[in-house]
Amino acid sequence: MAKRTFKVWRGDTSGGSFQSYDTEVSEGMVVLDVLHNLQATQTPDLAVRWNCKAGKCDSCSMDINGKPKLACMTRMNSLPPDQDVTVQPLKTFPIIRDLVTDVSWNYRQNKRIAPFKPIPPGPDGKRRMYQEDADRPQEFRKCIECFLCQDVCHVLRDRDGQDKFVGPRFMIRVAGLEMNPLDAEDHSGATEPVRLRHVQYHSVLHRSVPRTHQHYRQRHHPDERARRRSLLRPRVGDRTAHQRQEAAQGAEAGEGVTEADGAGRGDGAGTA
């Protein structure tokens, strides 16, 4: 076991300072393990927010050696062994006590974003979307809302922009909603009462959206989205893709199947 020195910020809304603690660190420990050890052996009143200890719950966000990290995912062997470990609360949000901050502002922003509003179903009562449209926002759904990106956003931290800007986490949420072709709500440009400036909104999309054979903004222009939705709705008298494929295969096999409007294979409407 190696001995390490932790400098932990202690205090509350009235102020505070760093206090040093020497502790033993064993192989495989993460920063959250060390903080729990300090609670058990040296400072039982240390306030630390945590929950799952698996990088899924977002609770143990803090600044470690000046960088925003999850304490449960920061291994001790990843930190310089010849330096003290400095642990402090997130700088952007109000301090409650010790390493715990009040992040409720983020939840208020989330409530102010217009929710998903499904488009009307097609004539068959179903809603359809392309698989590529379902795959595109998958990466955005992996966000655990640790708010580390909010913590390092200079608009929120240094420019007092919390009343004007929702931050990167919720820009990504808006982008994910706007990518969904089944969402009838218009999230682009400005959403009330949170205003997302056009240049900011599309700047995030330009950097974050994977490019396919067409540009995102071209594919998701309102006119293009309406056109794609109309293609997804089955029209009376049209063959499905499966029926057309069967007809083509039958023709190649010499079965004498021909195309006819409104005809499905074997439905009696198509005649050679």
Image: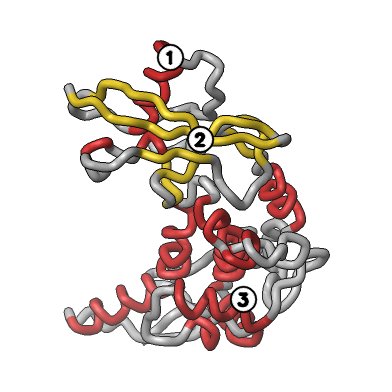
Q: Which quarter of the rendering shows the C terminus?
A: bottom left
- In the image, residue 156 sits, relative to residue 271, either above or below, namely above
Q: Which residue is mark 2?
A: 18
Task: Indicate which label's residue lies in the foreground, 3 or 2.
Answer: 2
Residue 182 visible in the displayed image: no
User: Which numbered circle lies on residue 245?
Assistant: none
Q: Amino acid at mark 1?
A: Gln
Q: CA distance from mark 3 to mark 2?
A: 39 Å
Categorize mark 1 by other alpha carbons within 10 Å: few (<14), some (14-19), many (20+).
some
Q: Which quarter of the rendering shows the N terminus?
A: top left
**Residue 208: x and y, percent?**
45, 72
Q: Are marks 3 and 2 in contact (CB under 8 Å)?
A: no
Residue 87 visible in the displayed image: yes
Please tell me which residue lies in front, 113 or 245.
Answer: 113
Residue drawn 51% across and 67% down? Answer: 129
Mark 2 vs 1, N-terminal side: 2
Quadrant in the rendering for residue 12: top right
Task: Indicate which label's residue lies in the foreground, 3 or 1.
Answer: 1
Q: CA distance from mark 2 to mark 1?
A: 15 Å
Residue drawn 44% across and 67% down? Answer: 136
Q: Which residue is mark 3?
A: 201
Total count of labels: 3
Residue drawn 48% across and 16% down? Answer: 43
Q: Which residue is mark 1?
A: 42
Mark 3 vs 2, N-terminal side: 2
Please tell me which residue lies in front, 154 or 222.
Answer: 154
Mark 3 vs 1, N-terminal side: 1
